[in-house]
Image: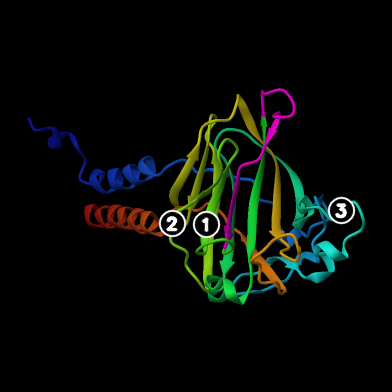
Amino acid sequence: MRLADHFHPTLPALCLGIAIVAASPAAAAPLMPDFSAGFGAWVTDRYEPASFSNIGPFAGRDNVLGIGINSTTSTPNRPSGLQGGFYNTQGRQVAVTGGAGSVVSADLYVPQSWSDHSLGSRRTDAWGILATGAPPPNALQYPILGFTNFGGAPRFRAWDGDIGWVDLANAIVFDNWNTLSMEFTGSSIEFSINGVLAYTDSTFIAPTGFNGIIMQAFNFGDPAISGTVVNDYVAAWANTTETPEPASLALLGVGLAGLALRRRRAG
């Protein structure tokens, strides 16, 4: 007797649906707080930018975080003691908790004008705060994923604590949203752009998980930095949500529809 003879006529369609569900990867746990809730829980990191707020609807998204950079927080206009280059990186952080399988992810809108450095120096990043088993000062480490057009072609890049910035070859979709994500696997950080793995950093010492997120932009209004083109800008970030791929949903729908049709015919 053939193996197929053991199957009920309705089972092939059902098996299709089951196979699709089983083949779908387990959903990662997103950690980015909902921007619609506001930013009361977020605290200044390094230096407060000119603005850090929900700018509402923007480019087809609601509840968009806008990090505003202008001359009011440039080096010459900061108080004494806060004029060093450390404070050119400006933003806020928030506490989160996430172990293996957790993801720091958000969508960055990259205007076409950012492709041309002569129209303005730009840099903005999402940072993870990763707790580790290493003693201070390495008990906390900082995987970073972001965009810059300064000092070279416009590019996404990742921060590797052992070697510094790593320029990524992933394409930038201008005048559109680009998804930047960092997943903690339990032993490493996987950096992805628009769903494509771009870089893996496996050099952390006994990492335990994310305990914070920082959203930053850079103020180029510093006379000590040569080659900058200084003007105002806003870095726009939107939340992302882990959902099944549309193609997988469509296939699952086909499988369930086939099951229903077979049942009707059998009846």
Is residue 98 magenta-colored? no
User: In the displayed image of the protein, which residue is found farthest to the right?
Assistant: 80
Badge 3 is on which residue?
82
Disc nearest the viewer among 3 and 1: 3
Residue type at mark 3 is Leu
Closer to the camera in the image, 259 or 220: 220
Tell me the quarter of the picture where residue 8 sits. top left
Left or right: residue 185 versus residue 83 is left
Which stretch appears magenta? 132-148
* Residue type at tag 2: Asn
Q: Are marks 3 and 1 in contact (CB under 8 Å)?
A: no
The answer to which of marks 3 and 2 sits earlier in the sequence is 3
Which quadrant holds the C terminus? bottom left
Labels 2 & 1 near each other (Cβ < 8 A): yes
Q: Position of residue 254 (x, y in %)?
A: 31, 57
Q: How far apart are labels 3 and 2 at the CA level?
A: 35 Å
Find residue 170 and name its label: 2
**x and y percent of residue 233 in the render?**
69, 72
CA gap, disc 2 and disc 1: 7 Å
Residue topped by disc 1: 156
- In this rendering, is residue 263 above or below 150? above
Q: Are marks 3 and 2 in contact (CB under 8 Å)?
A: no
